[in-house]
Amino acid sequence: MNLKMLTRALSAVGGAGLLLFAASALAVPESEWRRPWALNLPQGVTSLSEQVYNLHMLVFWIVCIIGLIVFFGVFYSVWKFRKSVGAVPAQWHHSTTVEIIWTVIPFLILLFIAIPATQTMVKIDDTSDYDMTVKVTGYQWMWEYEYLDEDISFFSRLDRDSDRARQRNPEIRPQDVEHYLLNVDNPLVVPVNTRIRFLLTANDVIHAWWVPELGWKKDAIPGFINEAWAEIREPGVYRGQCAELCGRDHGFMPIVVVALEQDDYEAWVDEQVNGNGEAEETAEVADEDNGEVAEQEDMSMDELMSVGERVYGNQCLACHQAEGQGMATFPALAGNDQVIEDREWVKDVIINGVSGTAMQAFGNRLNDEEIAGVVTYIMNAWGNDSGEEVQPADIRAAR
Amino acid sequence: MSSTTHDAHHDHHDHAPPKGMTRWLFTTNHKDLGVLYMVFALIMFFVGGAMAMVIRAELFQPGLNLVDPHFFNQMTTMHALVMIFGAVMPAFTGLANWLIPVQIGAPDMALPRVNNWAFWLLPAGFVLLLLTLFMPGGGPAGGWTMYPPLVLQLGDAFPFLIFAVHVLGISSIMGSINIVATILNMRAPGMTLMKMPLFVWAWLITAFLIVAVMPVLAGAVTMLLTDQYFGTSFFSAAGGGDPVMFQHIFWFFGHPEVYILILPAFGIVSAIIPTFARKPLFGYSSMVYATASIAFLSFIVWGHHMFSVGMPLAGQLFFMYATMLVAVPTGVKIFNWMATMWQGSMTFETPMLFAIAFVILFTIGGLSGVMLALAPVDLQYHDTYFVVAHFHYVLVSGAIFSIMAGVYYWLPKWTGHMYDERLGKWHFWLSMVSVNVLFFPQHFLGLAGMPRRIPDYALQFAEFNMISSIGGFAFGLSQLIFLWVIIKCVRGGEKASDQVWEGAKGLEWTLPSPAPYHTFETPPVVK
């Protein structure tokens, strides 16, 4: 199966193959923790997360006891010292002894909590001594993972089914989507029992990378690199979300971490690097230097428009709006003369972005077919009707 | 004017205010301005509440059911700005205006014209802010904290947001300077600082906090403005700046700000509990020192809002320890209120019910605050619904409950009529139950992994969100009773006595009900 057919299949089935890849091909168990009516933090799957959980439970029980003492005191007074049962008010209003007692005791309790809290903080902060490094980059609104020790990098976006179900008046109901809003097209795959260092940064605004079962979240800040670490003990699928408000689709950039046994992980890396297997190749489609230019066939207008509409919906709509009418500083595309007349300019803007504006470069995020589709779509949708057909080969040439 | 006080024509009017709109527009009378502030706060409470209803309706079930995510973000952002700067702060300032002069035996505020101007800037600022919702690109949607770079993506509304914040800040600063000047200069003979009611003390300290930190906020948003329009790079790494620096500056304002929203509440509750327990407040001086300690600590704990930004270990530990310390003076206050009730002789009129609910629910918010103070676990709690639950417990069932308690407590003094006790109790019990249905499940949501500020959520969060939304609608509707009680009380009702409450002590209860337009023109002597 060549790359192009794969891409078309991808467009047609909306990434279902990738979902299968994520969920079944890896055959790792789902976390027990994520379920309806869940009340508490997860114990997690790292030694760090367990330590955090234990600290959480310690302080939780302490504050519960303090709370109960206060509530009991108040309710007892309310019950006992009512005027209606003939209570006569005392007139004392001061006692240095009691006041010292209830200043000192809370202080000692805090001291008692501060010790394990400090130990845990020191442990979280220690990012030395790692076996591998993953660089995480936040984008509006997806994540990019780069394995710094391997030649692997890819983008990770909300999965197609969730994306369809999260629209207003959706084609499918959220209730019918497995892992609604908690599933991605390409999960982060890591080995167990390996000390992984995460380097976190962002491309546009501040994001935060949070998988509760790893025990922490950390901000991904444009222009700066944050460090964190995890050593996962059990194979499984661990899900999380962006935790820092990052714009319109902040709620729609989940994180999925798939932890594999060392052998399985190595097989996965091998597939990624050497391109064995089909589904994995698809996952890499956006970034591959495929060298198949000569074989690239023209796509029909319908195909281009269909791919373009999907890409537009995922990438462009948030700013340029559903009818291409634009919004505030985001220019209108519908009825825009330059868009209708200048296909070279449209291609250039999409591939390279416009510096100094919110328009990002999509050249390294979308493949030739996708860019060809979206250029064609923009030039023909909403009454633009330029009649232009931009083929993947044109994009290839323009890169 | 004073020479005509006893003129036969004016005898029974006692300096009646001018009639018509100009009375309210040009008034420099502290009672009129107090009323204006409180009416404004009430209107904003319903505006901000309507936004909260949109949020809870959207979150009623999974899926995008009502609004676009961009509009949802505008609602969360504006809800916070409106409630903080439009409802809670003006309500406290209104109470301060009305009460501080009559509690310290002063004829009016020290700077009456500043007082008028400080109030009228508020509606101007809010017109600016609320109009942004109708601008191309919509209103602010990056959170009330206005973090760059996200806030810089705001469209035409951006400069209006910044200007509105400036206007509101100027208003708060002028109001606070007036309060400080009044308290320090206009106390009646014998009213020493340590004899002042705790509400006055709380406001004196709050006013200093406002004067100290509002300019910091103004500076931070001005830097945003120059980053956007004048080519500076304070908060852009590409130009050598740092987006996290904004967060440091913002929270240096922001943490004192949250105590600005709660210290006056401590003062109100410290007035109400002794009245209805018929027993003097326990530990008056330790209450004053605790309030001052909390205010001091508020300046050195801002980093606990930023544990996840990647501060050095030493910074994280420092902010963790400092934050934990806040629990000590706060605990002293809670215990003092409990000790005041102990061996009292309590009755449970509506103000007392709200005050007791305040003690209980504020304690819940305070205890979850202790949990949040711990940096390593905050890395789990941060930016989740656990935080949302925490600050709504301290702000809604804390600050707003105290304001409601205060309104019921002083309403007879303001209007001369008793409010409808039966309706007041209905309002209390419905609010008390619904506020817990609304916010308690949000603790669970946060711990179970739901981030805040999201318009849609995974299916596992559906149950608790639905419960929370039902509580939200019930709480919203219950507030209509509050509105009705106030209107009814202004229009008529049983005549209130001068002292109003059997156990009430303090200068304001020596005045007739309703208090005349001008009071304490001859200072009382405090023994």
Image: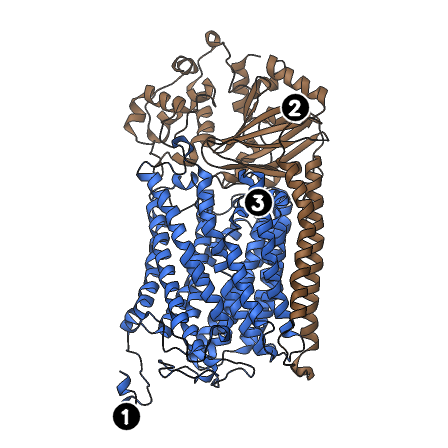
Please tell me whether mark 3 sits on a helix, a strand or a loop. Answer: loop
Quarter of the rendering containing residue B242:
top left
Please tell me whether mark 1 sits on a helix, a strand or a loop. Answer: helix
| Subunit of label 3 | B
* Residue B60 percent across, percent down from the top left: 56, 50
* Residue B391 percent across, percent down from the top left: 55, 55
| Subunit of label 2 | A
Number of residues whose C-alpha sits closer than 10 Å to that of mark 3, classed few (under 14), some (14–19) or many (20 or more):
many
Looking at the image, which is closer to me, B142 or B199? B199
In this view, B59 is above or below A130:
below
Camera-near label (1 vs 3) is 1
In the picture, the disc for residue B62 is 3
Please tell me whether mark 2 sits on a helix, a strand or a loop. Answer: loop
Q: Colour of chain A?
A: brown
Instruction: Identify the residue position indicated by label 2 in the image.
Output: A131
Looking at the rendered structure, the kind of residue marked 3 is: Pro
Looking at the image, which is closer to me, A142 or B516? B516
